[in-house]
Amino acid sequence: MKLLKDCLLYGFLDSAYLDGRNPELLCQQLCDGGVDLVQLRAKNWNQAEVASLAKRLVPITAESGVRLVINDYPLIAQEVGAPVVHLGQEDFFDAGYQDINEVNSVEAKFEIGLSTHSPDQARRSCDAGADYIAIGPVFATQTKPGRPGVTLDYVRWASENIDRPWFAIGGIDLDNVNDIISAGARRVCVVSAILRSPDVTGACRDFKERLLCASD
């Protein structure tokens, strides 16, 4: 399994984009396409449903050397042995946490990523010990309705100021990913442009190729 700093493409298994498809098969397609991380994000599911699917995804991602990321639920990550947890600002700071070590338990320690939407949030998240941060949404996206894009200016700022792995996220597709790369991003999260593609594996490979070229 790659170190976070060597990860380039962050994929998603988002319940809002399943459209009746088998989530395990979809996860395998993401892995086959070359994603380095897969986040399970199921905002409209109960915790039992999330935990059940997470257990089935662990062997799929592990066999492919891909990090499984659990969104919102550290206890589920601990239960199933997922290596990464992702939390929003409200799930971390508004919940009273100030340090990543407060989320990790004695029984299980995982990498933790935090969403950020401004330089101030990025600095605070890094100071709290986040293993990685997400920068965005760069462009307005239906995945985060009502939240305006933070624009490429935030990407440029991150490229000059962030000292740990960070991923650009939000409205990223094959038409604009080169602009994001030109602004300094070397890692991206992609949701709809992959999950809405008729060829999920092929879409992943297209994004990965762009990122590999930029990292050479």
Image (cartoon, grey):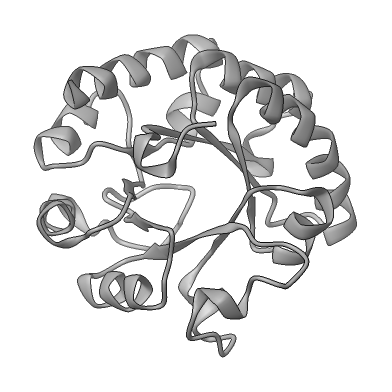
Query: Which residue is rendered at x = 64% and y = 63% of the image?
Result: 72
Q: Is residue 128 left or right of residue 88?
A: left
Q: Between 126 and 173, which is closer to the camera in this rendering?
A: 126
Q: Nearer the viewer, residue 64 or 169?
A: 64
Residue 192 spot, x, y in % from top left:
48, 33
- Total numbered labels: 0
- In which quarter of the view is residue 127 placed? bottom left
Residue 82 spot, x, y in % from top left: 70, 47
Quarter occupied by the C terminus: top left
Tell which of 103 and 56 is nearer to you: 103
Q: Residue at x 78, y 29 (%)?
A: 59
User: Residue most toward the bottom?
Assistant: 96
Above or below, 98 against 30 in this view is below
**Which residue extends farthest front?**
106
Q: Where in the figure is residue 53, as x and y percent of width and height?
A: 83, 41
Residue 199 point in image, percent of width and height: 53, 10
Name the residue at 42% across, 43% down: 4
At a point 49% along the width and 26% down the height, the residue shown is: 35
The image quadrant where one finds the N terminus is top right
| Picture layout, residue 145 above or below residue 177 | below
Left/right placement of residue 79 relative to residue 205 reads right
Image quadrant of residue 204?
top left
Q: Is residue 87 above or below residue 200?
A: below
